[in-house]
Image (cartoon, rainbow, N blue to C red):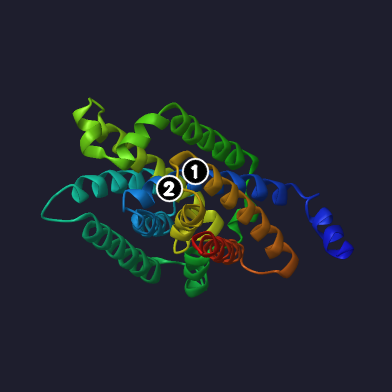
Amino acid sequence: MSDMIAKLQYYFTFPFVQYAMIVGLLIALCSSLLGVTLVLKRFSFIGDGLSHVAFGAMAVAIVTGITNQMLIIMPVTVASAILLLRTGQNTKRKGDAAVAMISVGALALGYMLINIFSKSANVAGDVCSTLFGSTSILTLTKAEVWLCIALAAIVIAIFVLFYNKIFAVTFDESFSKATGVKSDIYNLVIAIITAVIIVLAMNLVGSLLISALIIFPALSAMRVFKSFLSVIICSAVISVICAGAGMMISILLSTPVGSTIVTADIAVFLIFWIISLFKRG
């Protein structure tokens, strides 16, 4: 045990590990806040769809040789979030069908572009690391860390300031419209914030595992708690703890960061599920 603590202390002397931990915890916190709303609105797979869109946008950035990939990935993902919201409200095309169309199309086009135009000698390795998480979380610059801190602060501030409106839109959108709440605007804000979190989380868990980061903490909290506020607080605590534990375990055991974090989330979900069974019994 002392050897493991000593190893962690040694690694945390390096700035890149400190940066990774800060960004990882902030992404986990923001993901948990939006996760509760997305699960209750039955739009959980928006994270999955937008992550595939982000992968496609990243493929375009790689092919065109753009150094700052965020210039393409962020606007495309935000635009897709707005499109998903609008399409999901169309009675002819339900939300789940819209997610399927956009996510599968973007994933297929992105993979095709990388295979045709990529100059890398290890295309399969690059794609795999992008989909399931890579070491890019350990190569963050100080500017990228500050950008993540600023975006996370904006997400948290918006959620706190408009908590009552988000609560109303989440539980009864029709009633909130009747009482004068501009639910379309708040749905748009939720979609844009989700897109921002998806782009940030790609470096942490990879594009295929982002949905787990959003959904599992919320589902775990819902097994035990019933009120909206208590579920959000519990979800945030679970998400931050699992992210921190997952990153430390990945350092000690040399396992993939994203997969380790998601595994920790699954383990906590099973624990909360067992607790809920005892409460019912």
Q: Position of residue 154 (x, y in %)?
A: 49, 32
Tag 1 residue = 232
Any part of residue 279 in sight: yes
Q: Residue at x 40, y 29 (%)?
A: 162
- Compared with 17, 142 (above or below) is above
Q: Amino acid at mark 1?
A: Ile
The residue carrying pointer 2 sits among few (fewer than 14), some (14 to 19) or many (20 or more) residues within 10 Å by Cα, namely many
Q: Nearer the viewer, residue 196 or 260?
A: 260
Residue 138: quadrant of the picture: bottom right
- Compared with 88, 255 (above or below) is below
- Compared with 274, 61 (above or below) is above
Q: Position of residue 140 (x, y in %)?
A: 62, 48
Q: Residue at x 31, y 68 (%)?
A: 108
Residue 145: quadrant of the picture: top right
Q: Residue at x 38, y 52 (%)?
A: 39
Q: Position of residue 31 (x, y in %)?
A: 49, 48
Q: Position of residue 32 (x, y in %)?
A: 50, 47
Quadrant including the N terminus: bottom right
* Element type at mark 1: helix
Any part of residue 27 in sight: no
Tag 2 residue = 36
Residues at marks 2 and 1, CA–CA distance in whole angstroms: 6 Å
Q: Tell me whether circle 2 and circle 1 mark residues in contact (CB < 8 Å).
A: yes
Q: Is residue 215 left or right of residue 97?
A: right
Q: Amino acid at mark 2?
A: Val
